[in-house]
Image (cartoon, grey):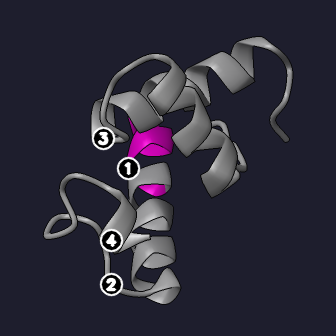
């Protein structure tokens, strides 16, 4: 994954690191009264979407893509 995104230095090195960071953010949002929604993103689909949109698969693009999936009802 790190070799495929434009900001690899800020992306966690392992799935475990990413998961810990995501769980912490989810807890923080919940404590603030914000409902967090988990969205499964397939890497190839994200990269294909970013290419089609002519944008890098950076943090903003990943969030935008997750929002599109959420709006389409494709999240759990």
Picture residue at 38% right of the left edge, 61% below the top = 4
* Residue 49 sits above or below residue 19 on the image: above
Cα distance in 3D space between marks 2 and 4:
11 Å
Cα distance in 3D space between marks 1 and 3:
19 Å
Is residue 30 highlighted in magenta?
yes
For the record, the magenta segment spans 27-35
The disc placed on residue 3 is 4
The disc placed on residue 13 is 2
Quadrant, the N terminus = bottom left
User: Do labels 1 and 3 touch, CB within 8 Å?
Assistant: no
Per the image, label 3 sits on a secondary structure element best described as helix
Q: Is residue 65 left or right of residue 21?
A: right
User: Which badge, 1 or 4, comes first in the chain's sequence?
Assistant: 4
Residue in front for this viewpoint, 38 or 44: 44
Residue bearing the label numbered 1: 28
Residue bearing the label numbered 3: 59
Q: Residues within 10 Å of mark 2 (few under 14, many from 20)?
A: few
Q: Residues within 10 Å of mark 1 (few under 14, many from 20)?
A: few
* Residue 1 sits above or below residue 73 on the image: below
Can residue 33 be seen at all in this image of the molecule? no
Cα distance in 3D space between marks 1 and 4:
29 Å
Residue in front for this viewpoint, 3 or 36: 3
């Amino acid at each position: 994954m790190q070799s495929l995104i434009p900001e690899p230095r800020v992306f966690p090195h392992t799935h475990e690191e990413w998961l810990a960071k995501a769980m912490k953010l989810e807890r923080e949002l919940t404590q603030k009264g914000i409902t967090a929604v988990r969205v499964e993103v397939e890497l190839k689909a994200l990269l294909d979407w970013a290419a089609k949109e002519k944008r890098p698969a950076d943090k903003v693009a990943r969030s935008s893509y997750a929002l599109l999936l959420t709006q389409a009802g494709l999240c759990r």
